[in-house]
Amino acid sequence: MPEILKYKDQYYKFKAIGYLDNFIFELDEILHELFNYFTDKSEIEQFENKVISENSELYETIKKQLEPFLNKFNSQNDYTQAVRCLMSFFSNKPITLDKPVFVKSGVVKKIAFALGEIWRSNSNDVISYEYLNYCKQLFSILDKQEISKENLFGCNFYKYAISTT
């Protein structure tokens, strides 16, 4: 004789198997905990707040350099995401996005120079290939920029990052 079980406002027919309904509800609780674990942003936010507080000057520099392009981002959220990603790069824990942050065309040279200014505010070293490559992957507008580890100084992207012209 089938047993009728209500689960999440749906009715299911099962053959009478001992403890089936307990199993389903326990599974539901486990799935709920997993969902909360993977969607709980508090740990991520705590880490980001710690990084920002430890590097507040860098955070302000990144915001200041990217702010002129705020209207070139698809949304305020994209701008915030770009700031977070750059902060993560300088904290040696770079965030990898599924897709680049969209920036409208027409500002390749200016945004490259702003990224160079961000680098220079944090380091006295020559702009690294790793940084330029990260920025290329981060911003949609830079995806067509060619960079080469062997000839970094000859790449247009590097030249844009060090000069306003």
Image (cartoon, helix red, strand yellow):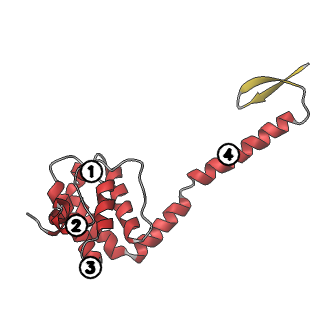
Q: Check disc 4: other Cα within 10 Å, few if <14, some if 14-19, many if 20+.
A: few
Between the residue at mark 2 and the residue at mark 4, the CA separation in whole angstroms equals: 49 Å
Disc 2 marks a residue whose amino acid type is Leu
Q: Nearer the viewer, mark 1 or mark 2?
A: 2
Q: Nearer the viewer, mark 2 or mark 3?
A: 2
| Residue receiving disc 3 | 125
Which type of secondary structure does the marked residue at label 3 adopt?
Answer: loop
Query: Residue 68 at what x, y percent from top left?
Result: 19, 58
| Residue receiving disc 2 | 152
What's the mark number on residue 143? 1
- Quarter occupied by the N terminus: top right
- Quarter occupied by the C terminus: bottom left
- Quarter of the image for residue 156 reads bottom left
Marks 2 and 4, the one that precedes in the sequence: 4
| Residue receiving disc 4 | 32
Between the residue at mark 1 and the residue at mark 2, the CA separation in whole angstroms equals: 16 Å
